């Protein structure tokens, strides 16, 4: 494993940053550099905010989902701190359709070989599923078994024609891949399905129980659940030999036009015609406290903002921090914000930095691929500069990093669609960590013969400061904590946050925010989206697995 080292290369970066902070003749010198802010923004400080968010969830039904009291209390907590620190703070109210699961779901195989499956372990209700209690034969829809060698080989359920000959009233068995889950479920409903079981596709990182969302625009009133590749494959094998009868029960509530908020805070000084934005979604999924997703991003930019104020930093360019609501319902808050901006105000945003999950327990250091050289999806002009700033910073402190695609799964999507340069950091979600990544970042690629994801508690109740108490595999989390020398422990308890990775992310966030806050050069160039970014933006919705 490659440990962090403060080397000569970083000294050069710090020196160049200090030069960049030299004032123009119209502005007093700013006696800080990136190293000062980095030293102030610590993992301990971020963890204290995560502790507060955990307390909020504990006091509000174990969730901080948008539209719930837990989300409102999260906004209150951050707003109070920012107001006291001297920021110009506003709430932006908007509405969305909220989703609540009223009772535990039920899934059983009636025949052959009856089996009752364990909710939240073997299967999960898809967010925005309708309600229903159905017992019916299962019918497979265009499955690819064995699975292809790469993700999205399967197009199961993506076309209406996949359901040609489907027997109305049956429960559809479809496979993850290629299109949004809502498309698969809607096509099944149109074909007369009484329920839908979506199983994971089968490649490494696509085997675990699928915790999917259909998005708040989904309106079909039928039960939709996600399950693992192993269970889906078993059901498909049984179907090949004869009839399989399943029993599905979901009881859900979708409330229309629920109010929630974005929270926006801006420095009282700095050029407002070249605003630097940093954002993170504040909401959790309904299942839990959302401490890694996305308490970590929210707490990291909060601590950055507070330490900038504490150090008396007066940026050349105004810095605007944003905490987005209803991300888990489909990136609604950030899209609402960008859509609400007059064109002139959009043009004043120099760039957007996105931080969604920056403390995954089995982390890797992912940097959004702004220049498109890794994934072929380029961001708007200037996004390449953001990518290089982050990757150069990690290299300078002796830490590995690697690109991740602009695939539309987080709040940068609205910004790149509007032609605003964007970038950011991510430490991994449901994907499986590779053996090569273990060499670079530590951790585990396998445990008890099974692949290990970057965050084994992604979108589950165990995404908390006490994951084992909230249902996580105790032996796995003990092994992860041991692999990282205790980096998951917080106040004597193994948490769902890796403080070693979080510390590096905190350094990178502080470095980027301050560098762009103080730069005298333009980043965004033409401020026009590249054809590939405009073409790709919006294909996926939300980090909560729309496809």
Image (spheres, rainbow, N blue to C red):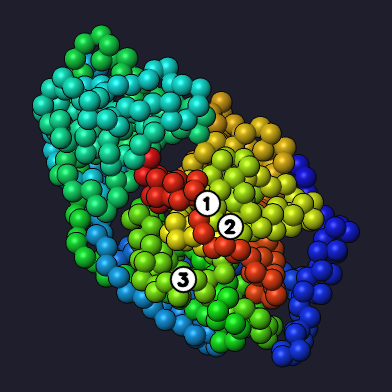
Q: Quadrant of the C terminus?
A: top left
Q: Which residue is mark 2?
A: 381
Tag 2, which secondary structure?
loop
Please rate how many residues cluster around mark 3, counting C-alpha atoms within 10 Å: few if below 14, some from 14 to 19, many from 20.
some
Sequence-wise, the earlier of marks 2 and 3 is 3
Distance of mark 1 from mark 3, alpha carbons? 17 Å
Sequence-wise, the earlier of marks 2 and 1 is 2
Q: Are marks 2 and 1 in contact (CB under 8 Å)?
A: yes
Q: Is residue 460 above or below residue 139?
A: below
For residue 530, the mark is: 1
Please rate how many residues cluster around mark 1, counting C-alpha atoms within 10 Å: few if below 14, some from 14 to 19, many from 20.
some
Q: Position of residue 415 (x, y in %)?
A: 47, 61
Q: Residue 505 occupies which quadrant of the picture? A: bottom right
Q: Residue furthest front?
A: 526
Q: Residue furthest right?
A: 8
Q: Position of residue 118 (x, y in %)?
A: 32, 35
Q: Position of residue 23 (x, y in %)?
A: 76, 84
Q: Quadrant of the N terminus?
A: top right
Q: Could you tell me which residue is drawn at 72 percent across and 47 percent down?
A: 400
Q: Position of residue 47 (x, y in %)?
A: 58, 65
């Amino acid at each position: 494993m490659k440990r962090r080292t403060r080397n000569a290369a970083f000294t050069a970066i710090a020196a160049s940053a200090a030069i960049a902070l030299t004032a123009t003749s119209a502005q007093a010198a700013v006696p800080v550099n990136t190293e000062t802010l980095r030293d102030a923004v610590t993992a301990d400080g971020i963890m204290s905010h995560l502790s507060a968010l955990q307390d909020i969830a504990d006091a509000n039904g174990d969730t901080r989902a948008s539209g719930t009291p837990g989300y409102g209390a999260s906004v209150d907590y951050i707003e109070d701190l920012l107001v006291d620190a001297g920021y110009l703070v506003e709430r932006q109210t908007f509405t969305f359709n909220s989703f609540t699961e009223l009772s535990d779901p039920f899934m059983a195989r009636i025949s052959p070989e009856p089996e009752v499956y364990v909710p939240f372990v073997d299967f999960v209700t898809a967010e925005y599923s309708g309600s229903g209690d159905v017992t019916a034969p299962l019918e497979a829809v265009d499955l690819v078994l064995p699975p292809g060698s790469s993700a999205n080989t399967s197009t199961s359920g993506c076309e209406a024609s996949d359901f040609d000959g489907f027997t109305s009233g049956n429960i559809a068995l479809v496979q993850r891949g290629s299109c949004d889950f809502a498309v698969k479920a809607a096509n099944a409903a149109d074909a007369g399905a009484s329920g839908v079981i979506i199983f994971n596709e089968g490649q490494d990182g696509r085997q675990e129980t699928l915790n999917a969302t259909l998005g708040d625009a989904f309106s079909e009133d039928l039960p939709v659940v996600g399950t693992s590749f192993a269970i889906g494959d078993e059901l498909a094998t049984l179907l090949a030999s004869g009839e399989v009868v399943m029993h599905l029960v979901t009881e859900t509530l979708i409330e229309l036009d629920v109010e929630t908020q974005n929270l926006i805070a801006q420095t009282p000084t700095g050029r407002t015609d070249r605003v630097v934005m940093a954002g993170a979604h504040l909401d959790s999924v309904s299942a839990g406290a959302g401490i890694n997703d996305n308490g970590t991003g929210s707490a990291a930019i909060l601590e950055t903002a507070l330490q900038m104020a504490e150090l008396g930093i007066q940026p050349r360019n105004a810095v605007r921090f944003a905490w987005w609501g209803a991300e888990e319902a489909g990136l609604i808050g950030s899209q609402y914000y960008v859509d609400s901006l007059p064109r002139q105000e959009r043009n004043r945003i120099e760039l957007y930095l996105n931080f969604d999950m920056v403390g995954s327990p089995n982390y890797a250091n992912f940097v959004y691929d702004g220049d498109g050289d890794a994934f072929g999806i380029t961001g708007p002009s200037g996004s390449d500069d953001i990518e290089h700033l982050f990757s150069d910073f990690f290299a300078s402190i002796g830490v590995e990093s690697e690109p991740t695609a602009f695939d539309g799964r987080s709040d940068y999507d609205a910004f790149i669609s509007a032609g605003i340069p964007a970038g950011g950091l991510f430490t991994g979600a449901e994907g499986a960590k590779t053996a090569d990544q273990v060499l670079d970042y530590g951790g585990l690629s396998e445990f008890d013969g099974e692949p290990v994801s970057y965050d084994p508690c992604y979108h589950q109740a165990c995404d908390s400061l006490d994951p084992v108490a909230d249902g996580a595999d105790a032996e796995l989390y003990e092994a992860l904590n041991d692999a990282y020398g205790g980096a998951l422990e917080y106040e004597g308890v193994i948490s769902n946050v890796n403080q070693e990775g979080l510390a590096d992310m905190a350094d990178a966030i502080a470095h980027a925010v301050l560098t762009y806050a103080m730069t005298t050069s333009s980043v965004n160039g033409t401020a026009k989206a590249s054809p590939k970014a405009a073409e790709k933006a919006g294909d996926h919705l939300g980090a909560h697995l729309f496809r």
